[in-house]
Amino acid sequence: VKVLESKKIELPKKLAKRYPAYELYLYGEGSYAEEHKILPLTGIPVLFLPGNAGSYKQVRSIGSIALRKAEDIDFKYHFDFFSVNFNEELVALYGGSLQKQTKFVHECIKTILKLYKGQEFAPKSVAIIGHSMGGLVARALLTLKNFKHDLINLLITQATPHVAPVMPLDRFITDFYTTVNNYWILNARHINLTTLSVAGGFRDYQVRSGLTFLPKLSHHTSALSVVSSAVPKTWVSTDHLSIVWCKQLQLTTVRAFFDLIDADTKQITQNYKKKLSVLTHHFIRHPSKHFEENPAIISDLTGI
């Protein structure tokens, strides 16, 4: 029996004082959890951001699947899944905490990268998975004055209402949306962050698929929007919560993560074309075979 255990990451005292309600955790289970009680870490960091009333424990599904996949390849590569505890705040109903959450996530990213200090293949950036409003908080990071864009190498959002709030209940929410979307539209040419938005489809009664599409003017070379029922090898619609534990979708996401690893740096590739082709392969057109960077032509029909 594998013991599930999330290790609470100790934050700098100033940070813990400024954000007393928030916490950062490292997901672990079994022998992996035991080994990683002692820092520094040696894997590839992925940060999970929960949404409205969401729990940091929702990282468990993808974290567990990624661990199985790492075991299959004898830990040649492995991912370290971190998760933020936002104290299950109702940010879809009251937007006053959104800016605070965004600033806390920025501090978490810097804290996470310090955990790898001194390692031969230490990461310089993290991948982010954001569920629901967590995906919007991740996009809001780019609007912070002192945020370095190269701290994020990949953003995957699940059932995130990017276009507009589901319920515009207060000025905090509407202003936050306006700031984020205006920034992404006006700076579209300069945003090189590879972003994938996955919608739940017809079963998601809370966030309809039309709200999950990334702004049209955002960098067309690095932004993809899909519906889970159209994702190869997934083919199912998910409701708003089950998108975080839908096994088919998490398997697809984990396969994509492992294909994104650069063998030289042992971290996620910095090559934008490769990132996009891997995501396209797994989430848009899967030809029922492993990802190849330069696939051979199966049949040459010239001269016919």
Image (cartoon, rainbow, N blue to C red):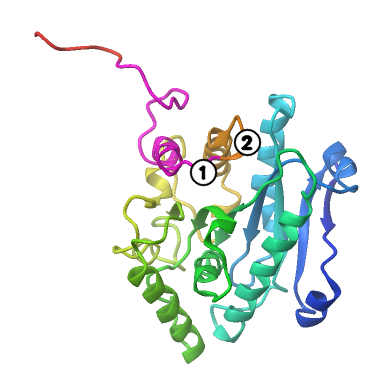
Residue 171, x across and y down, in percent:
47, 91
Q: Does the magenta stretch include residue 254?
A: no
In the image, residue 155 above or below residue 291: below
Q: Residues within 10 Å of mark 2 (few under 14, many from 20)?
A: few
Mark 1: few/some/many CA within 10 Å (<14, 14-19, 20+) = some
Q: Say which residue appears at 76% left-offset and 56% top-offset.
A: 114
Residue 280 — which label?
none
Please say whether residue 283 is one of the residues in the magenta stretch: yes
Q: Residue at x 81, y 75 (%)?
A: 16
Whether residue 24 can be seen here: yes
149 to 5, vertically: above or below: below
- In the drawing, does residue 10 fall left or right of residue 262? right
- Seen as rendered, the residue at the extreme left is 304
Q: Which amino acid does label 1 sit on?
A: Gln
The image quadrant of residue 258 is top right
What is the count of numbered marks? 2
Q: Which of 169 and 182 is in front in this view?
A: 182
The residues colored magenta run 269-297
Q: Nearer the viewer, residue 182 or 87?
A: 182
Residue closest to the far top? 303
Residue designated by label 1: 270
**At which x and y percent is residue 279?**
44, 41
How many angstroms separate mark 1 from mark 2 (CA)?
Answer: 10 Å
Q: Foreground residue, 236 or 271?
A: 271
- Kind of residue sitting beneath label 2: Thr
Mark number displayed over residue 265: 2
Picture quadrant of residue 298: top left
- Nearer-N-terminus badge (1/2): 2
Q: Are the residues flagged by discs 1 and 2 in contact, CB closer than 8 Å? A: yes
